[in-house]
C-alpha cells in the first residue's frame, strides 16, 4: 500500500534524508547490472550509500574497487543447498573468507562490481537475499537458532520469523526508515537473541486469558549499542504468536513516521523511545494495532548469550543438535564445504548460525553423533573450545572496514589463544573486541569489552590502542559494562589482559562469574590493578 511521507516537507532534514526522498535505497538493485557492465569507475559517488540497501559496503580502502557483502539468514537457519551456495561464493569470489556476524548473517569480502549480478542470481536460486542486510531498513531478523528443535523454547518461532522477514523483504513501504532497524524474534527462555540490544524484540511470555494459559510474547523496544547505548524497554502488552507480524508492522510504522530525521546520530528508534517513554509508545502502538491485553509473565530463566556448545537432545526423540565454536566467527570456504557435507551425511543438511558467531548442526541421530565428531574439520571448529577462544567475539576491524581504527579479528584470536595457554579459570570470561564506537562486536554486553582507539605517544606517534570496559550482561534486563581509565597500547594488550585476569583469579570467589565479581567488588580494585600494570 502507498503511504504518505509525513516528514518530506521538514526543512531540517539531513542530507541523507534528502537523497532518499529522491531515490529509494532499494532502487540500487535496478542499477547494479548496469554498473557491473560499465565497471567500478562508472558508479557515481552519491550512489555508494545506496549500495547498503543491497547489503554492500565499500571495502577498505574505498577506492580499491572491492565490496563487503552481507547475506540475510533469518534466525541463522541455512539449508544444505544454501550453505553450499554460500561456500561457492566465498571460494569463487571472496578469497575463501566466510564470516559469521553477530546478527546470524554471512559476510563476504573482496567482491567486485562485475561479480555482483552472478552472486545475486546464485543467492536467489536458493532463496537467499542481501536486501536489507545493511541500510536504513529492517536488517536481518535475529532469532533462536534452535527454533523448532529447542526443548527450551516456549513456541516454535521458525514460521513466525520467516513470515515477518518476507513481509519486509524489498517492501518499499518500509525501505526508507530514519536509520538502521534491528529486530529479534525469540522464544528460547535463555534469551538466545540478546533481546535488550535490538530496536524491537519479541520475547517469550505467557498469560492467563479467560481462565486459560496462553503462550505468546512481550514486546521490547528502544535497544541499541553504538556510542550511545540503550537497553530495550518492555511495553505493557501481551501478544499471541499470530499477532507478531502485525505488531512488527505497527512498531516499524511508528519508527518510519515519527522517528527523527534531522540528525543522523539521533535517528535510531532508541532515541524516540527514550523521549516518548513506554506509555506514549504503547498508546501509539494500540492506535495502529487495536486493543491488546496487558503484559503477562516473562518466562526467561537466564541468559545464554547465544552459546550452545556440545551435544544436546532435541525436542524430537532420538535427535541431537551439536554446537561448535568458530574462532572469532571466521571460516575458510573449504571448511564450509566440509560442514555442509557433514550436516547432510549425519543430519538433514541444515546448519544454524548463532549470534555468538558460532554454528550448530541439528537433527543428528544418536548413532551418528560419535562418527560426526570424529571428522577432521572439527579439530579447529570444536564442541569443547578452551575458555577464552570459545567466548571471544570480534567485529571485522581495520582489515576490511572503513570505519575501524584498529585491527580486531585476528588480534582477538591471537590474544584468546595466548590467554588459553597462560591461565585457567573456573568460569568462562566473555571477551568482545570492536574497532570503533559503532560496536558491531557488541562490546557493551561483554564481561570484558575492548574498544579500539588511536593513542598519541612520544616514542611512536599515533598508535593503535584499546580502552577496557568491564562488567556487561543481559541478565535480568541487562547492564552495560563500564570503562576503566587509561588506554592500552595494542602491543601490550595480551600482557595487560593476562595480568588483569590473574588478579581476577586470585581475588574471586569459587564459581563466581566475572560479572558477579564486578558487581561485588566494584570498579575500584580493577582500576587500581590496571593502573599498577600500566605503570610497571
Image (cartoon, rainbow, N blue to C red):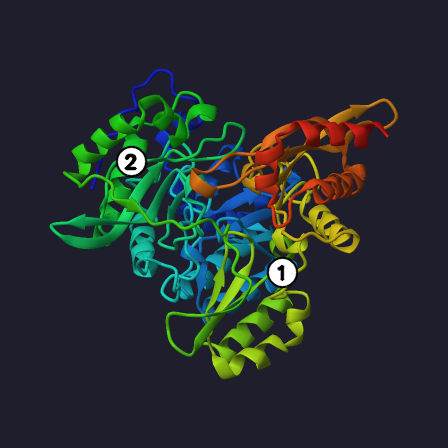
Give the residue number, with chain letter if any, for mark 2.
235
Reading the chain from its start, which is encountered first: label 1 or label 2? 2
Give the residue number, with chain letter if any, for mark 1.
331
The crowd level at tag 1 (other Cα within 10 Å; few <14, some 14-19, many 20+) is some
Q: Position of residue 377 (x, y in %)?
A: 65, 71
Q: How far apart are the alpha carbons under marks 1 and 2?
A: 39 Å
Which tag is nearer the camera, tag 1 or tag 2? 2
Residue in the image at 75% along x and 50% along y: 419
Looking at this view, name the residue that lies furthest to the top. 11
Looking at this view, name the residue that lies furthest to the right. 459
Q: Report the quarter where the C terminus lies.
A: top right
Secondary structure of the residue carrying numbered label 1: strand
Q: Is residue 91 left or right of residue 10?
A: right
Residue in the image at 72% along x and 42% along y: 501
Secondary structure of the residue carrying numbered label 2: loop
The crowd level at tag 2 (other Cα within 10 Å; few <14, some 14-19, many 20+) is many
Q: Position of residue 60 (x, y in %)?
A: 65, 41
Determine if residue 121 is in view.
no
Q: Position of residue 384 (x, y in %)?
A: 63, 64
Q: Are marks 1 and 2 in contact (CB under 8 Å)?
A: no
Q: Report the quarter where the N terminus lies.
A: top left
Q: Is residue 219 above or below residue 186?
A: above
Amino acid at each position: 500500500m502507498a503511504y504518505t511521507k509525513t516528514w518530506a516537507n521538514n526543512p531540517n532534514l539531513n542530507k541523507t534524508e534528502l537523497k532518499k526522498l529522491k531515490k529509494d535505497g532499494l532502487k540500487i538493485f535496478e542499477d547494479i547490472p548496469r554498473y557491473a557492465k560499465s565497471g567500478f569507475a562508472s558508479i557515481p559517488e552519491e550512489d555508494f550509500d545506496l549500495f547498503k540497501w543491497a547489503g554492500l559496503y565499500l571495502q577498505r580502502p574505498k577506492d580499491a574497487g572491492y565490496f563487503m557483502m552481507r547475506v540475510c539468514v533469518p534466525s541463522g537457519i541455512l539449508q544444505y543447498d544454501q550453505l553450499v551456495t554460500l561456500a561457492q561464493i566465498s571460494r569463487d569470489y571472496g578469497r575463501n573468507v566466510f564470516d559469521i556476524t553477530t546478527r546470524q548473517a554471512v559476510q563476504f569480502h573482496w567482491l567486485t562490481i562485475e561479480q555482483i549480478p552472478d552472486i545475486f542470481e546464485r543467492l536467489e536460486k536458493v532463496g537467499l537475499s542481501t536486501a536489507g542486510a545493511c541500510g536504513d531498513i529492517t536488517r536481518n531478523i535475529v532469532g533462536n537458532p534452535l527454533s523448532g528443535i529447542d526443548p527450551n523454547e516456549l513456541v516454535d518461532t521458525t514460521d513466525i520469523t520467516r513470515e515477518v522477514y518476507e513481509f519486509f523483504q524489498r517492501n518499499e513501504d518500509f525501505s526508507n526508515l530514519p536509520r538502521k532497524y534491528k529486530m529479534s524474534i525469540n522464544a528460547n527462555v535463555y534469551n538466545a537473541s540478546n533481546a535488550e540490544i535490538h530496536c524491537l524484540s519479541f520475547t517469550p511470555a505467557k498469560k492467563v486469558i479467560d481462565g486459560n494459559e496462553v503462550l505468546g510474547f512481550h514486546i521490547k523496544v528502544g535497544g541499541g549499542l553504538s556510542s550511545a547505548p540503550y537497553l530495550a524497554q518492555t511495553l505493557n502488552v501481551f501478544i499471541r504468536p499470530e499477532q507478531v507480524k502485525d505488531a512488527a508492522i505497527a512498531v516499524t510504522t511508528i519508527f518510519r513516521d515519527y522517528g527523527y530525521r534531522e540528525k543522523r546520530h539521533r535517528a535510531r528508534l532508541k532515541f524516540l523511545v527514550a523521549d516518548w517513554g513506554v506509555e506514549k509508545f504503547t498508546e501509539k502502538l494500540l492506535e495502529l494495532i487495536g486493543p491488546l491485553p496487558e503484559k503477562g509473565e516473562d518466562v526467561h530463566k537466564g541468559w545464554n548469550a547465544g552459546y550452545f556448545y556440545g551435544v544436546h537432545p532435541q525436542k524430537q526423540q532420538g535427535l541431537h543438535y551439536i554446537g561448535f565454536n568458530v574462532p572469532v566467527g571466521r571460516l575458510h570456504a573449504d571448511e564450509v564445504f566440509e560442514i555442509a557435507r557433514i550436516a547432510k551425511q549425519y543430519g538433514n543438511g541444515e546448519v544454524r548460525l548463532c549470534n555468538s558467531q558460532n554454528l550448530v548442526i541439528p537433527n543428528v541421530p544418536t548413532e551418528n553423533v560419535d562418527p560426526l565428531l570424529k571428522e577432521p574439520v572439527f579439530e579447529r571448529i570444536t564442541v569443547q573450545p578452551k575458555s577464552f577462544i570459545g567466548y571471544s567475539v570480534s567485529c571485522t576491524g581495520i582489515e576490511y572496514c572503513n570505519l575501524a581504527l584498529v585491527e580486531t579479528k585476528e588480534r582477538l584470536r591471537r590474544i584468546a589463544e595466548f590467554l588459553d595457554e597462560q591461565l585457567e579459570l573456573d568460569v568462562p570470561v566473555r571477551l568482545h573486541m570492536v574497532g570503533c564506537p559503532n560496536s558491531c562486536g557488541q562490546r557493551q554486553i561483554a564481561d570484558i569489552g575492548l574498544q579500539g582507539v588511536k593513542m598519541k605517544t612520544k616514542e611512536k606517534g599515533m598508535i593503535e590502542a584499546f580502552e577496557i570496559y568491564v562488567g556487561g550482561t543481559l541478565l535480568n534486563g541487562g547492564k552495560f559494562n563500564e570503562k576503566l581509565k587509561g588506554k592500552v597500547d595494542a602491543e601490550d594488550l595480551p600482557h595487560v589482559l593476562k595480568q588483569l585476569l590473574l588478579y581476577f583469579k586470585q581475588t574471586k570467589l569459587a564459581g563466581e562469574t566475572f560479572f558477579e565479581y564486578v558487581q561485588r567488588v566494584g570498579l575500584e580494585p580493577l582500576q587500581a590493578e590496571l593502573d599498577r600494570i600500566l605503570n610497571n
